[in-house]
Image: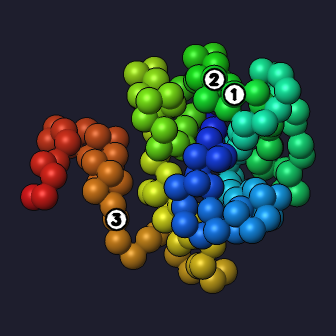
Amino acid sequence: MKRFYLIDGYNVIFRDPDLREIYRKDPEAGRRRLLDLVSRYAAARSARGIVAFDGGESPEGRVEPSSSGSVETIFVKDADAYIRRRVYGAREKDALVVVSSDEAHVARYARGMGIRLVRVEEFMEDVRVKDRMPRGRSEKPESETEDGVDYWLEAFGSGQGKRKKGG
């Protein structure tokens, strides 16, 4: 089952210091940089995705093709509402990953619907590791995040459940 990322575009841009700086100088360049990073990340993982941005004139949005073919860009009237609709209508919930740190409008809803949520900071850390990695090296990170360890403990049914934070 191919992983599908549903990304809250402006939430990522405004929570990531580097992208935010680029966006403030040139909004189009900030969006392009995010899309470039996400496209390469998705291609390296044989995944697909949609980066949703607020600013379209309709709930259905205006789709722009990506250079890689693995990630689409969509401009919708309300990106949070668009993401919630996609989560609600998801057929393969195990394959879907929502990327957002918007707790009030996106994150809580995605988790409540049983969708894997990745916070922006964790996602961008992983994206940057993949972006810096020379060809031919292992894709495994040098270290694992606590959320990553918890994910694998749950995935392999260790019976331990969530680890206690700080220990």
Other-residue count near label 2 (Cα within 10 Å), few / some / many at <14 / 14–19 / ≥20? some
Residue lying at the far front of the rendered structure: 24
Find disc 3 in the rendering and name its residue: 144
Find disc 1 in the rendering and name its residue: 78
Residue lying at the far top of the rendered structure: 89
Q: Are marks 2 and 3 in contact (CB under 8 Å)?
A: no
Q: CA distance from mark 1 to mark 3?
A: 34 Å
Residue 132 visible to an observer of this rendering: yes
User: Is label 1 in a helix, a strand or a loop?
Assistant: loop
Mark closer to the chain start, 1 or 3: 1
Q: Could you tell whether 76 is left or right of 64 in the image?
A: left
Other-residue count near label 3 (Cα within 10 Å), few / some / many at <14 / 14–19 / ≥20? few
Q: CA distance from mark 1 to mark 2?
A: 5 Å
Residue 4 coordinates in the image, percent (x, y)? 64, 39
Nearer to me, 160 or 165:
165
Q: Amino acid at mark 2?
A: Ala
Find disc 2 in the rendering and name its residue: 81
